[in-house]
Image (cartoon, rainbow, N blue to C red):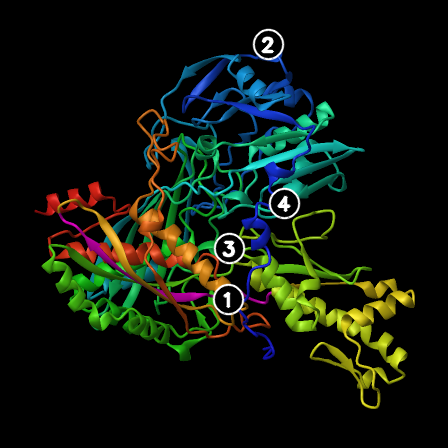
Amino acid sequence: MDTKFGKSQTGVRFEDLRFLTGQGRYVDDIAPASALHAVFLRSPVAHAEIRALDVSRAAAAPGVVAVLTAADLAAAGVDLSMRATVVTNRDGSTGAAPARPVLARDRVRFVGEAMAVVIAETPLAAKDAAEEIEFDLHDLDPHLALTVGGPQIHAEAPLNLAYDWAMGDEAAVHEAFRSAAHTVRLEVPDNRVIVNAMEPRGAWAEWSDGRLHLCVNGQGVWGQKAKLAAMLGLPEDAVRVTNPDVGGGFGMKAMSYPEYYVIAHAARALGRPVRWMSDRTEAMLTDNAGRDLVSVVEIAFDAGHRITGYRVETISNLGAYNSEFAQLIQSELFSKVLTGVYDIPAAYLAVKGVYTNTTQVDAYRGAGRPEAIYALERTMDLAARELGIDPWELRRRNFIAPAAFPYRTPTGETYDVGDFARVLARVEAVADRAGFAARKAESAARGRLRGLGLCCYIESILGDPTEGAEIEFCADGTVNLYVGTQSNGQGHETVYARFLADRTGLPVEAIRVIQGDSDRIASGGGTGGSRSVTTQASATLAAVEVMVAAFTPFLAAEMGVDPGVLGFDEGRFRAPGSNLTPGLIEAAAMARAAGRTDLLRHRAAYTLPGRSYPNGAHVAEVEIDPETGETRVLRYAVTDDFGNLVNPRLAEGQVHGGVAQGLGQALCERVVHDDYGQLLTASFMDYAMPRAADMPFVTFTTEPVPSTTNPLGMKGCGEAGTVGSMAAVGNAVLDALWDKGVRRADMPFTPERVWRLLQSAD
């Protein structure tokens, strides 16, 4: 473990100045002035055969340069089909893999699916021309229920079943339930939500000198680069992908989408840049959604209220297609949190994925960390009530003990470290649990219902465990740090620059962080799964070690000392008997003067030997007006174990943002389709987002237990706030309603839904 790490200095984010003064470089800001504008004609129905598609009038409209359909792309040699990722079903067969066309061919399968694209000189001309396209759609029955069966969407998927996958020891779990003293069962729906990033999706493409450049507001460039090359029949070295500033990603922008391939082909075919930017309703119709699953959770206990078995059966909505990892329900994506923070001898998970006539649901649904923790923690809370034990004590009784680490879960994952009881004790004090009874009585005196909810969570650092970093000394005295991750608003430029400065003594103001360019950076895993800072800082540390080792023999010769006695400490090279103590900027200048250009650039990659496991406890306190059903979160406390922190303020900001996202789903967000597959929540007039008034003050504290799986002892924090907040609020709402006879309360806790729960209970 590197004990020098972690000055943990909180400072102003470098990138904020340009963001707050309107100087951000977003996709729509930096598109070439000569770029043509793309507008997509989208299906107005959820499921239909395309019997005719006539674009002749649109093609002749003023300002139109081209109108493209699937037939045009196929004629040009474009591979129309986005690939699906499949798994092996529990019976050994392969999951369904229907192709997703970048433009609909014979059938449309959700409202908003692109059927054609108009390329014109102005956005208005493109929009007007799109309305001139004539089409004949023969309506088919949609499948919208979260069930197997119904009107078939894909020939490759009978009964609309995408996969039927399982993991764990089914026989051991069966025995645990057969011999249990107590069992608890709960059905846990997880409502569908729309990401609604501040910046909607967009991209522009240009073709020059036989090379394609796609600029897209994504979460990494190398996956998109490989897919573009394959679909357009180009060698990979003929494709450049860049990510400029990105206004929010949330996993949704990590995926590829049909529009990117279509405008890339159009730019190549027309010899002019082509740009596309979605509006908000278009984004709501076409962006990958989140959640949308139902789990049946069962927990078996012995007579001492210790868990002996855990069983989960989930049915998960994939939407109309399963492109971009939506079916990647492998053990590495679920086993990390299948048993949470609890010592469980036997566990079993079964997941069925189904297709519906809705837009695709984001990756890992049915197996994601927020979904898994939400289902487990809601059931643990109910179990405590049914067993007549304090819910905090039930959790303490079942925590994995510190002495048990490294702990191997029944699904084969190994947690390296943790002290869950210490985390819980800290949040109990911070949340003033002891004072809750008095606060509840005060609320009751005003005719209000008050509830306290707890969620203990654990997540894991997912994604590619390998990352690279490169350090370049420039002639003007600045230093470029090339990174393989991609900031979507997290403050990476500040974190990485300060980290490099802390490790090397380089002036932080001289460091420029370079990201999101497949031409300038050799490789990278992008951003997602809370991986960025842990992997990138480890890679940067490795690059520093390579750099110091490379400079040592050169500087030893310059200083006239033996390389073995030359050391690097506090940002300077030092040797006994020499009064020279060059820093790295000076060393680079000496190398440049000596013609040693090989010393001006240093690269290293680092592979994490194992995953780290951020964990923590969230406590929400809510108050409900029984006359209206209005639910307000009045108090919120979080204690997290993120290991060693690089920048506490940025970590706290990540938690605040994650809590806000979780509160949004818990209190108000919900995607609604009608019986015909029309999206009824397709604007901010209809889709409720959390507002400032919905956010309580969040008290954030840490109880770090440094990870042993990376040299810096770090654990990720990007998704922690969301993982813990949904169940904390859900449990608080049920706690407030319990005395009124309510025994089940599901998200979102809108006033109307909570009011109906109270009326039904009465």
* Residue on which the image places disc 2: 56
Helix, strand or loop at mark 3:
loop
Q: Position of residue 731 (x, y in %)?
A: 25, 57
Disc 4 residue crowd, few under 14, some 14–19, many 20+, Cα 10 Å: many
* Residue on which the image places disc 1: 715
Q: Amino acid at mark 4?
A: Asn
Residue extending farthest to the right is 594
Q: Amino acid at mark 1?
A: Lys
Q: In 3D space, how far apart are the residues under numbered discs 4 and 2 (Cα atoms)?
A: 35 Å
Disc 2 residue crowd, few under 14, some 14–19, many 20+, Cα 10 Å: few
Residue 243's disc is: 4
Residue 609 is one of the magenta-drawn residues: yes
Compare marks 1 and 3 and give the one earlier in the sequence: 3
Residue 674's disc is: none
* Residue on which the image places disc 3: 529
Compare marks 2 and 3 and give the one earlier in the sequence: 2
Compare marks 4 and 2 and give the one earlier in the sequence: 2
